[in-house]
Amino acid sequence: MASLENFRLVVFRAVAEQLSFRKAAEELYLTQPAVSLQIKALEEDVGVQLFDRTGAQITLTSAGNVLLNYCEQVKTLLAQTEHEIAALSGEHAGQLALGASTTIAQYVLPRLLGEFCREHPRVHPTLVSGNTEHIVEAVEKQKISLGFIEGPARSREVKSEPFLEDELVLIASTAHEWAERASVSVSDLCSSPLLMRERGSGTRRVIEMALERQGIRRNVMRIVMELDSTEAIKSAVEAGLGVGFVSRWAIAKDLRLNKNFKIVEIEGIRIKREFLVTYIKGPEPKGLAHQFRKFLIARAGMQRALIQPLKASTSAGHKKCS
């Protein structure tokens, strides 16, 4: 089914979100003059100016802000309409806007999303990725219907629920001195060069909270580098730049292929977490978002077979860094 949304409103939303005719043209695969013509025609239709073009950067006028608010509502209503029309024949169809933090987007969601789309070929998903803060912000602004995050959502505007268990493990290069050790102590961890995700990352937040509960203060950790992705941490570990925490989901395939790093146990510490699905507070998601959320929770448990079983928790006592 073709999009039911008026094309001029599609162009308007793109310009309003990008605040750039050039970027909107790139997003929509149009020429910049074509975008300008659509905006000019829309302004003639509504009889007011929608963008202030006097400064170095365009901005929305008051009328433009009003129209953008209703455009978002129209988009949601039309997506729901498309879904309900398809449902009359027992199908699911339409656009499904999703966002996921990087670990989930790379290692968990593609397989689940692929299965959902094979069952419902008329569904057209879009997936954006970023750290947890970026995904929560996209949910708040209703740019996406569902967000999938790795750490707690620091927002009162969204609701979150767990859908899959994860564990963060410490990895070291096989050439590292820890590679042959059964485990390392908390003191060892405090004195070793540590690779961490960037601030705003859900993974980093969970790690810091877990270590603080064991008496490891952030200011005593030797963080030698901050990286913006799990793949960057894995590469840096292999290069011998330090040790780092990653999701078990992110290394399941690597361990099967005998990559050049290994998991290092830390005495007395296990860092478990739940991956969360998050959506705007209020009524539960409807339409495709509701269907995919149900599908996800039902199927996610089956994904556990794809990673090595979690080891039994160690019973060593907790030590604090001084």
Image (cartoon, grey):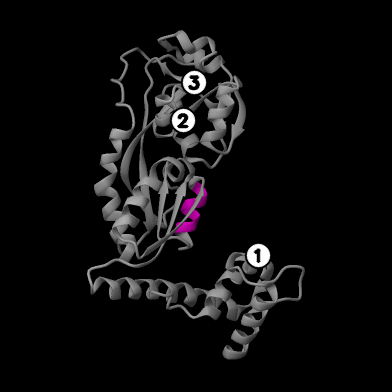
Does dot 2 land on a helix, a strand or a loop?
strand
Q: Which mark is residue 246?
A: 2
Amino acid type, label 1? Lys
The picture quadrant where one finds residue 82 is: bottom left
| SS assignment at label 3 | strand
Indicate whether residue 261 is drawn in magenta.
no
Query: Which quarter of the rendering shows the N terminus?
Result: bottom left
What is the spatial separation of the Cα atoms under label 2 and label 3, in whole angstroms?
Answer: 12 Å
Picture residue at 61% right of the left edge, 71% below the top: 15
Query: Within 10 angstroms of label 2, few (less than 14), some, or many (20 or more) residues?
Result: many
N-terminal of the pair, mark 1 or mark 3, is 1
In the rendered image, the vertical position of residue 161 relative to residue 72, given as above or below: above
Q: Nearer the viewer, mark 1 or mark 2?
A: 1
Q: Which residues are magenta?
A: 133-139
Residue under circle 1?
23
Of the numbered discs in the image, which one, if any, rests on residue 261?
A: 3
